[in-house]
Image (cartoon, rainbow, N blue to C red):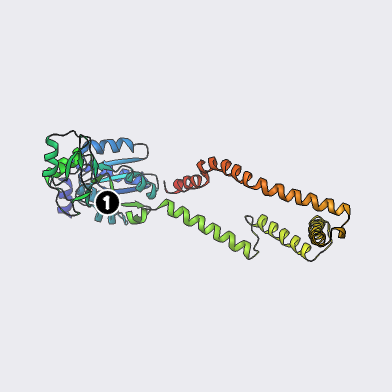
Amino acid sequence: MAEERHHTENIPQWKKDEIENIKELIQSHKVFGMVGIEGILASKIQKIRRDLKDVAVLKVSRNTLTERALNQLGENIPDMNKYLDKQTALIFTNESPFKLYKLLEQTKTPSPIKGGAIAPADIIVQKGPTSFPPGPILGELQSAGIPASIDAGKVAVKETKVVCKAGEAVPRKLATMLSKLEIYPLIVGLDLRAAYDDGTIYEPELLAVDESKYFSDIIRAIQNAFNLSVNTAYPTRATIGTLLAKAYGESKNLGVNAVILEPGVMDALLAKAHVQMTSVASKAADKDANAVDDDLREVLGAAASAAAAAAVATPAEAKEEKKEEEPEEEEEDTSEEDGMAGLGALFG
């Protein structure tokens, strides 16, 4: 006990203050996380800190001091110590872990790779022209393993080529040429290792929600539930209108097909009878012109004229309708965007 007290007394005051500051930040925020900052320039960290100042506090401290602070807070907070590795920063926020993850992903930007660094993925140079005029750059590209030639007065890459495979060290010459070609193989930004929220630790695999897929799954579930409710005649606030419309249509069809003389179906019955009558009269007139009287013959003539006019008008109407529909194709369906906005509010 005496040794522990003596050891504590020997801790410099600035370290004690740093530990207390970390503990205070954890206790005053709903969520805190561990982020990796390896390979990020100090200037970029400062920019990220400024960009996040309204929603999060970013703090860079020594891992040993962070570990002490977490241990002193007790409960299951010390479990976060396992995410302390190499260059680590702490981030504190009152937003959800999902929004924190999304915010940190937005800090990531393409960055050039240095000679000797390990390629995180296959580095590919695409075929096509460059902005360089003929000159020494041609030989430099070729010596770096990039197939280049002169085309239309400009240096061009002759073919698409994998110039460095994932896991291989990038040669210094190639790294220089990639930067000149504005090919940036690295994605640099704050890398969230874990977030702590009210006793629960969230790792990136859980926080990386595909919002578009999640939204599609919700829409599909809603459609399936709606169809099930309608097909099983299960009334709900969302389906009662459709169920009533369906019931009305089915009852009207029954009334027409069963020839039930009710006010709601009389118009349909009379229209059906009229069509049947003109059909019979037309066939009778085809066999014997005297089989129908003048009034009925006039009705048949009017029906034939209307049918001929409709046949002529249909192609023109279809063409006009197509013209009217074309601008509508350019209109954006904002319903899905509104839904995505609502879902974005849920996950940040």
In the rendered image, residue 106, in percent from the top left (x then y), is placed at 33, 43
Q: Which residue is mark 1?
A: 70
Can the viewer see residue 145 in this picture?
A: yes
Q: Nearer the viewer, residue 15 or 234?
A: 234
Q: Nearer the viewer, residue 288 or 10?
A: 288
Q: Nearer the viewer, residue 299 or 267?
A: 299
Q: Residue at x 54, y 42 (%)?
A: 326
Can the viewer see residue 14 in this picture?
A: no
Residue 104, picture quadrant: top left
The 10 Å Cα crowd at callout 1, few under 14, some 14 to 19, many 20 or more, is: many
Residue 213, picture quadrant: bottom left
Q: Is residue 193 above or below residue 54?
A: below
The N terminus lies in quadrant: bottom left
In the rendered image, residue 8, in percent from the top left (x then y), is placed at 18, 48
Q: Secondary structure at mark 1?
A: helix
Three-letter amino acid code of the residue under disc 1: Leu
Q: Is residue 116 left or right of residue 27?
A: left
In the rendered image, residue 94, in percent from the top left (x then y), is placed at 39, 44
Q: Residue at x 43, y 51 (%)?
A: 212
Q: Is residue 12 left or right of residue 338?
A: left
In the rendered image, residue 72, in percent from the top left (x then y), is placed at 27, 51
